[in-house]
Amino acid sequence: MKLNELRDNPGATKKAKRIGRGPGSGKGKTGGRGIKGQKSRSGVAINAYEGGQMPLYMRLPKRGFNKPNAKKFAVINLNVLQKFIDAGKIDAKAPVTEDVLVDSGLVRRKLDGVRLLAKGELTAKLDITVTGASKAAVEAVEKAGGKVTLPAPVAAE
């Protein structure tokens, strides 16, 4: 077999129907669009239009609420933290702050703060300072002999 002998299987490709090329083509004159009306014209997009009937997206009830000033936290789990300590990217003997986590590459950016979650095991004794932590994560760190420092809650004004 040579490169110039390569062919597609018979019937694998089909010529595209050429629209609007005379009456003999079977798709001439109006080009399969019918006669008159909005959809026969060019440049018309009728998304979600249901012929004057109330569209589905308007018939369905609105639900929920998106908080416009919601805080977005960078999330770390205990198992990933332990993996970075084992790899030597984080020094467990020194205090672990959010800046240390960013420098090690565990967190890309702090966003509104770093939040510690309790997925996985932690064996290293850590002194870690983060913006937030779940109760289970705090218990797991204290069980391993470390301590979690959280900022004091701000009183509502």
Image (tube, rainbow, N blue to C red):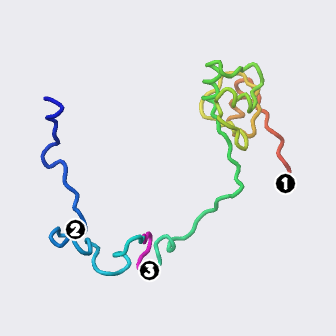
Q: Secondary structure at mark 3?
A: loop
**Is residue 68 or residue 27 the one in the foreground?**
27
Assess disc 3: are there few (<14), some (14-19) or many (≥20) residues with their C-alpha within 10 Å of its C-alpha.
Answer: few
Q: Is residue 16 left or right of residue 102?
A: left
* Mark seen at residue 53: 3
Q: Secondary structure at mark 2?
A: loop
Q: Where does the image place residue 40, in percent across and percent down from the top left?
A: 34, 75
Say if residue 100 shows up in the picture: yes
Up the image or down, 110 lies above or below 45; here it is above
Return the residue at label 2: 21
* Residue at x-position 61% and y-position 19%: 87
Dot 1 amino acid type: Ala
Q: Where does the image place residue 156, in percent across and percent down from the top left?
A: 84, 54
Q: Is residue 11 left or right of residue 108?
A: left
* Residue at x-position 72% and y-position 55%: 69
Q: Answer whether labels 2 and 3 touch (C-beta < 8 Å).
A: no
Numbered range of the magenta stretch: 45-53
Image quadrant in which the C terminus is located? bottom right
Dot 3 amino acid type: Gln
Dot 2 amino acid type: Arg
* Mark seen at residue 136: none
Distance between the alpha carbons at the discs numbered 3 and 1: 48 Å
Q: Answer whether labels 3 and 1 touch (C-beta < 8 Å).
A: no
Q: How many marks?
A: 3
Distance between the alpha carbons at the discs numbered 2 and 3: 37 Å
